Amino acid sequence: MSIPAFADVAKASNDLLNKDFYHTASAAIEVKSNTPNNVAFKVTGKSTHEGATSGLLEAKYADKPSGATVTQSWNTINALDTKVELNDTIAKGLKTELLGNFLPSTQAKGAKLNLHFKQPNLHARAFFDLLKGPTANIDAVIGQDGFLVGASAGYSVEKAAITGYAAAIGYTTKEYTASVTAANNLSIFSAAYYHKVNSQVEAGAKATWDSKSANQVGLEVATKYRIDPVSFAKAKINDRGVAAVAYNVLLRPGVTLGLGASFDTQKLNQATHKIGTSFTFEG
């Protein structure tokens, strides 16, 4: 089993709790297509419950023999983003990412360099913001026999000081994962658990405690049920009584429909509930 990145130590539970819940937008659409010359196009559009709309056009070209990938995107705020990825080109196990951002309306520019290094028992990353600061964020996870230990730290060249740090421990198998993360300078603690009960049922939970601002522990639990090979349903609820449900179905090859809703069970007579839909087309 490969070693996850620091941000993915609790990925299984985070995905169960956060992915495929469609109430977060009133409507969303995604269209994906691929050309014979290894160019992948993606168009996404989203309408929020407040009426705002956003969209993104993305083109990705992959040169498999060289391990290079170029991605260009353009969104509705007129921001141009370019990413160049070099995978195993400089060294085995090293992925290099060069990212550029340009906003014509304000002439704002951004440049970043990301490094990902993977070995059988190590996953290390370094993120450099070359124009702001500059700043660096570095994290690493080591693992052995399912046990994981990781840490991260941020550094500002301008301030010549560490800007933040975090740590995590975890244990993972094919059936379940458990982790504890201490973020925000070891002041916010999260414990997460995920269990693949069988081929149809998944369950997970996450508890969070902010040692600086609250004594109460936040709790969220979720489950996923695979109805048949082309559809599944999800449900979750948190300690504040906010519940969400979702349904995902493959209508036909390349066409997926997602339906979702959230309800505040303590304010059922108020207009706090949300409903959302999502369509994904792949060709």
Image (tube, helix red, strand yellow):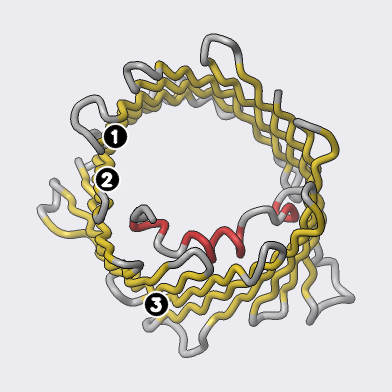
What residue is drawn where x is 66% and y is 26%? Answer: 32
Query: Quick one: SS at disc 2?
Result: strand
Q: Residue furthest top?
A: 37
> Whole-Å distance between the Cαs marked 1 and 2?
8 Å
Amino acid type indicated by mark 1: Lys
Left or right: residue 159 compared with residue 282: left
Sequence order check: which comes first, mark 1 or mark 2? 1
Amino acid type indicated by mark 3: Phe
- Along the viewing direction, whichever of 242 and 267 lies nearer the viewer: 242
Left or right: residue 246 compared with residue 144: right
Q: Nearer the viewer, mark 3 or mark 1?
A: 1
Location of mark 2 (residue) = 118
Q: Position of residue 142 (x, y in %)?
A: 25, 61
* Quarter assignment of residue 227: bottom right
Q: Nearer the viewer, mark 1 or mark 2?
A: 2
Sequence order check: which comes first, mark 3 or mark 2? 2
Q: Position of residue 139 (x, y in %)?
A: 25, 55
> Whole-Å distance between the Cαs marked 3 and 2?
27 Å
- Compared to residue 142, the image places residue 117 above or below, namely above
* Quarter assignment of residue 94: top left
> Whole-Å distance between the Cαs marked 3 and 1?
30 Å
- Along the viewing direction, whichever of 220 and 281 lies nearer the viewer: 281
- Compared to residue 132, the image places residue 32 above or below, namely above
How many numbered discs, if any?
Answer: 3
Query: Quick one: SS at disc 1?
Result: strand
Tell me, yes or no, whether the two marked residues, 1 and 2, touch with CB atoms within 8 Å.
yes
What residue is drawn where x is 34% and y is 22%? Answer: 67
Q: Position of residue 231 (x, y in %)?
A: 79, 51
Tell me, yes or no, whether the two marked residues, 3 and 1, touch with CB atoms within 8 Å.
no
Location of mark 1 (residue) = 95
